[in-house]
Image: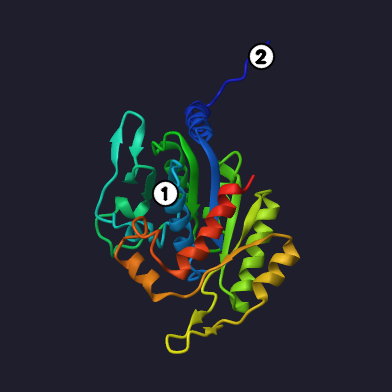
Amino acid sequence: MAQTIQSPQDLLQKPQESRLIKQMRSIRKKIMVMSGKGGVGKSTVAANLAARLADRGYKVGLLDADIHGPSIPKMFGIEDQRPGVDENGIVPIQVTENLKVMSIALLIEDKDSPIIWRGPAKMGAIKQFLQEVSWGKLDYLFIDLPPGTGDEPLSIAQLIEKLDGAVVVTTPQDVALLSVRKSLTFASMLKVPVIGIVENMSGMKCPHCNEKIDIYGTGGVERAAADFNVPVLGELPIDPALAEIEDQGRVHLEGNADLEWFREFSRITDAVENFK
């Protein structure tokens, strides 16, 4: 009887794949945070979802999968820290008792050095973050993706055997909504459940009269949500205080700040926590 001879490549690949599967099975919910275009506050939403659910007692991991523009370490004030290594793999940065973070930015000595990689190199890095980082048992792993529907989100969707959901972030203007519709279609094609849409930069209060100013317009997010039969999770206002919190690396420390932004964000956190 003929015997199938495995190539050295196959023999090397199987243990890696089984390690990836084992890692992912230790994580109860794997959720990607995505956007159709850049500059809409996707990383802000990802960072706050991770921090707020960690505040509620869940064990949470946050993977910054934006290879070319990682910003998560800055928001948590850990950009000068470096991951360790133990017998289980790469040790992510422990931000709080319940929150771990990993990013390519934590492995680069010069913050001004660009990552000049083609698709295969980026895919390899993302695979290593998923299978070699010692995440341990988690309730949630949030994956902060770069904008668009290219290499990184496709790699995540293919590598993880089952993504539990996607949160799509947009701003109200039509230019952003053109792209967010592509993100919703992308999730549908890959059979990733969409938890909902977050409308960021949803107007601001005038500092003089306290009236809301709809800088980017209104109504477009609701129409897109209706077209794709997904909910709008929340409408986050523009607030300069939030930018200061992120710039100072205090996202994990300011969740109870008396800001309208955080009060509205608690609704988004509730929706993600209760999503089945």
Residue bearing mark 1? 55
- Residue type, label 1: Asp
Place of residue 205 in the rendered image (x, y in percent of width and height, measured from the top left): 48, 81
Quadrant placement of the N terminus = top right
Please report contact status of discs 2 and 1: CB closer than 8 Å, yes or no: no
Farthest residue toward the top?
Answer: 1
Residue bearing mark 2? 2
Numbered circles on residues, count: 2
State left or right for residue 269 relative to residue 177: left
Q: For the residue labelled by badge 1, is the local secondary structure a helix, a strand or a loop?
A: helix
Q: Is residue 111 visible?
A: yes
Place of residue 116 in the rendered image (x, y in percent of width and height, measured from the top left): 39, 60
* Residue occupying image coordinates x 41% and y 49%: 55
- Residue type, label 2: Ala
State left or right for residue 50 relative to residue 25: left
Between 11 and 165, the one lying in front of the other is: 165
Quadrant placement of the C terminus = top right
Placement of 259 over or under 211, stated as above or below: above
Question: Which of the two marks, 2 or 1, is nearer to us in this view?
Answer: 1
Query: How busy is the neighbourhood of tag 1: few (under 14 within 10 Å), some, or many (20 plus)?
Result: some
Q: Which mark is residue 115?
A: none
